[in-house]
Amino acid sequence: MKRKARRGPQLDYSIQALQRGLQVLDVLLDVGTPLSMEQISAHTGLPKSTAFRVIVNLLQGQYLTQTDQGYWLGLKLLRLGTLVEERLELTQQARPLLIQLRDQVNETAHLGVLDDDLRVVYIDKLSTQHVVGLMASRIGSTAPMHCTALGKAMAAFRPEGEIREWIHHNGLIALTEATIVDEETFLRELRRVRSLGYAVDNGEFEASVRCVAAPIRDRTAGVIAAVSVSGPATRMPNPLTGSAMAMQVVEAAQRISQALGYS
């Protein structure tokens, strides 16, 4: 009879390794200058052999770099810091306009970005008093790109080859009867989004919820996010395409883009 593998100690070891890596990074941030392996060991209290292993792992992940003066914070941390700063600026600039949009249409307004796997990440959400009870969106949660207005509004401005490759790896999974599951149909949908300047979700993610979204651009004219309005199918305009609500969402996206430096 096979014994079940014990996962507890392995998990504990992984957490301990993570804590030690963060401990080294914290020391470098506090000191503010590169440190040798011996200095890192002294500051953290880690044995030299342990400090060496932690440093090697951080170097491999580009969280540290080696200089003539010692070990210092690497490019990965710089990229992470830049990303956090950009997201903070985006949220701060968008929030007043997101509030205004929510109040204009009296429905839930969202702000979202795409992660590296082309999933929508909700970074802000403003609800009304009559919010949709079954709406799955939460700040920090993710949703598929191919069946959400936010996702389509951003994916439409990615290279078509990149989208085809994503489809070949992930497929177009049906979440409702309205979800687009054919590759060529989906690509035509993205071309339509580019032509209109906004995207719609007609119950493709949640059968009872409809949504319209428009892309947000930064000072380089690149699409970095999208803003949307969602509501129950019974309250949303029918059709959404060409509706006054769609134009309000586009206007909000343009004003957020201008606040971020887009001209």
Image (cartoon, rainbow, N blue to C red):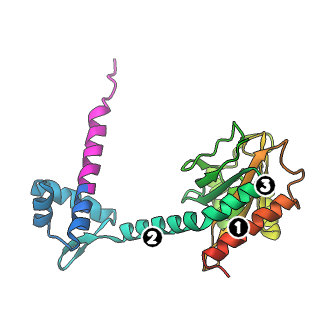
Secondary structure of the residue carrying tag 3 is helix
The total number of labels drawn is 3
Secondary structure of the residue carrying tag 2 is helix
Residue at 56 percent across and 47 percent down: it is 141
Dominant secondary structure, magenta: helix
**Residue 26: which quarter of the image?**
bottom left
Looking at numbered disc 1 in the image, what kind of residue is underneath it? Ala
Residue span colored magenta: 1-22
3 magenta-colored: yes
Residues tagged 2 and 3 counted as in contact (Cβ below 8 A) = no
Check residue 105 in the rendering and tell me which mark sits there, or answer none: 3
144 left or right, relative to 236: left
**Residue 248: which quarter of the image?**
bottom right
Mark 2 sits on what residue?
82
Separation of residues labelled 2 and 3 (CA atoms): 34 Å
Residue at 82 percent across and 67 percent down: it is 196
- Quick one: label 2, few (<14), some, or many (20+) residues within 10 Å? few
Q: Which mark is first along the chain, 3 or 2?
A: 2
Q: Which mark is first along the chain, 1 or 2?
A: 2
Separation of residues labelled 2 and 1 (CA atoms): 22 Å
Check residue 253 in the rendering and tell me which mark sits there, or answer none: 1
- Quick one: label 1, few (<14), some, or many (20+) residues within 10 Å? many
Q: Nearer the viewer, residue 227 or 200?
A: 227
Looking at numbered disc 2 in the image, what kind of residue is underneath it? Thr
Quadrant location of the C terminus?
bottom right
Instruction: Please state the horizontal and vertical placement of residue 50, each as a whole percent of the image.
Output: 15, 54
